[in-house]
Image (cartoon, grey):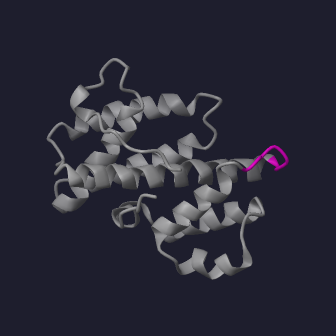
Amino acid sequence: MFKIPDRVADLFGDHATRVEFHRALLAANQVQGYEEKYLEDGPFSEIARITYQRLKDFDMSALSADRRELVASAKALSHRLITSGYAIDVAAKANGRALDDWPELLAFTREKCEGGARVSDNEGWERCYTHIVDRTEAALQPERPTEDRDAGYAVLRHFASFFSRDAGYERRWFIQVPDAA
């Protein structure tokens, strides 16, 4: 099992997302009693992992539309937070740095992710990509520490790699990231 770097919490973690994950697990009746306190104050990366593990095979068909949307969004977001952590780790091990082409990479990634959100099979994808891509854009700003910029660039490369066969994709953006098990 891969360890999710703490950079995920630094870039993407906040109280609102913790609450969203907790609410989704409750809506799906997937919280074990002993996990309640952990979901409130545990490490953000572990909360993402627990959320994804509990929801990845959960059948949402019996849920109301609003609960289904909540659960689908939490499932997609927790999944991509885990793989974003892997991308940060892979790039750091390869001494990957943010390049000056980040605005082009951001524009490509945002455009492709917006299109992916319109596909009917991608439940929860819009919430997922907006949360992550918006935060990576903030991390890439010149006034941010190099470590944040490098991590944000790695995550954008990860998301852009989903669209590696599309026009406008630059091969230098490719990053091989394992999927969340």
Residue 36 location (% of width, % of height): 66, 78
Residue 149 location (% of width, % of height): 22, 54
Question: Is 155 located above or below residue 104 in the figure?
Answer: below
What range is drawn magenta here? 58-64
What's the residue at 50%, 50% (across, down)? Answer: 180
Question: Is 150 located above or below residue 107 in the figure?
Answer: below
Residue 160 location (% of width, % of height): 36, 34
Residue 168 figure quarter: top left
Tell me if residue 61 is in the magenta stretch: yes
Q: Nearer the viewer, residue 136 or 44?
A: 44
Q: Nearer the viewer, residue 67 or 9?
A: 9
Tell me if residue 175 is in the magenta stretch: no
Residue 13 figure quarter: bottom left
Residue 38 location (% of width, % of height): 58, 78
- Left or right of 96 on screen, residue 47: right
- Left or right of 5 on screen, residue 97: left
Query: How many numbered discs?
Result: 0
Q: Nearer the viewer, residue 143 or 87?
A: 87
What's the residue at 68%, 80% (across, down)? Answer: 34
**Residue 134 visible to the viewer:** yes
Question: Is 25 located above or below residue 104 in the figure?
Answer: below
What's the residue at 22%, 54% (across, down)? Answer: 93
